[in-house]
């Protein structure tokens, strides 16, 4: 059976889930993921709002507003971003917006933002070519061009859980758990609360408050999701029809002091 036919017949919701059970297709599957996602990385005005948002749901613009401070204090914002996404749209948006705001170059923004962690739990489509610590061998520009070299770099940056079943040994998962369990506030956006993903995050009850977006989720689904948090966890949940921006404005209290 070919990769394409196996994926279509499996009826799973993602290529990642298929590859976890079919390791013989790992390399072709990762190349397929790269070839599908790379064309979305378009460095024009429209791409400055990642494809996961709509013009009326630009939650990243709201985040940038809350991060308002002097350039020298930019890295003092107490923020960590953990994502399961492979694309780098969020990084591109943040860096582009901040470079324009402060009149700085991308390398200067990247170095100043270094203390703000951006954790791609399943890897990313290569490293963006900014900052003094970026590895040239793993760099790929934010560009939609697909060719053997760009696909190879993106493919090598993608990680499938079956490649290392013991996710506790993965440095990024270890780092994410530490950041989540040490935080005072944890915000979930666009997250499905799948039991496996919740287990992998290793969430503990340490006095933090969890703000959970439940867009598109019915009552029973929301109840199932909240039951996957530690017993007694402090959870503030959004409504079924609340977009991310609405949810943040209704529920999440940010401190604007770096």
Image (cartoon, helix red, strand yellow):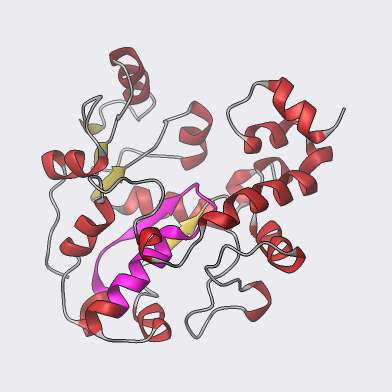
Q: Residue at x 14, y 54 (%)?
A: 254
**Residue 140 in the image: above or below residue 240:** below
Q: Is residue 157 left or right of residue 256?
A: right
Nearer to us in this view, 197 or 61: 61
Q: Residue at x 53, y 72 (%)?
A: 128
Quadrant position of the N terminus in the picture: top right
**Residue 160 in the image: above or below residue 212:** below
Give residue 71's quadrant in the image. bottom left
Give residue 38's quadrant in the image. bottom right
Q: Residue at x 34, y 56 (%)?
A: 49
Give residue 218's quadrant in the image. top left
- Residue 196 location, x and y as percent? 53, 30
Quadrant position of the C terminus in the picture: bottom left
**Residue 218 in the image: above or below residue 7:** above
- Residue 217 location, x and y as percent? 33, 22
Q: Is residue 154 left or right of residue 95?
A: right
- Residue 169 location, x and y as percent? 62, 51
Q: Residue at x 65, y 21 (%)?
A: 11
Nearer to us in this view, 68 or 183: 68
Magenta range: 76-99
- Residue 152 location, x and y as percent? 74, 62
Asked if residue 95 lies in the magenta stretch, the reply is yes
Nearer to us in this view, 15 or 233: 15
**Residue 235 in the image: above or below residue 105:** above
Asked if residue 231 lies in the magenta stretch, the reply is no
Confirm whether residue 204 shows in the render: yes
Confirm whether residue 123 shows in the render: no
Q: Is residue 110 left or right of residue 253?
A: right
Q: How many marks?
A: 0
Q: Residue furthest top?
A: 220
């Amino acid at each position: 059976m070919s990769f394409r036919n196996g994926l279509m017949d499996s009826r799973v919701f993602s290529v990642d889930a298929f590859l976890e059970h079919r390791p013989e297709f790992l390399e072709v599957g990762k190349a397929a993921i790269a070839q599908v996602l790379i064309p979305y990385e378009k460095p024009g005005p429209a791409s400055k709002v990642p494809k996961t948002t709509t013009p009326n749901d630009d939650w990243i613009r709201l985040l940038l507003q809350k991060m308002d401070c002097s350039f020298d204090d930019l890295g003092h914002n107490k923020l960590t971003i953990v994502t399961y996404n492979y694309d780098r749209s969020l990084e591109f948006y943040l860096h582009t917006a901040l470079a324009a705001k402060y009149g700085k170059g991308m390398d200067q923004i990247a170095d100043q933002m270094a203390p703000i962690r951006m954790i791609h739990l399943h890897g990313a489509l290569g490293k963006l070519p900014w900052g003094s610590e970026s590895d040239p061998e793993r760099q790929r520009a934010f560009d939609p061009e697909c060719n053997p070299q760009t696909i190879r770099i993106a493919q090598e940056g993608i990680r499938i859980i079956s490649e290392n079943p013991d996710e506790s040994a993965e440095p990024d998962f270890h780092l994410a758990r530490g950041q989540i369990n040490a935080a005072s506030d944890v915000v979930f956006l666009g997250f499905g609360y799948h039991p496996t993903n919740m287990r992998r995050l290793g969430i503990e009850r340490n006095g933090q408050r969890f703000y959970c977006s439940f867009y598109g989720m019915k009552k029973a689904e929301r109840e199932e999701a909240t039951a996957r948090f530690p017993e007694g966890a402090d959870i503030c949940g959004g409504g079924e029809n609340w977009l991310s921006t609405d949810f943040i404005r209704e529920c999440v209290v940010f401190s604007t002091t770096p």
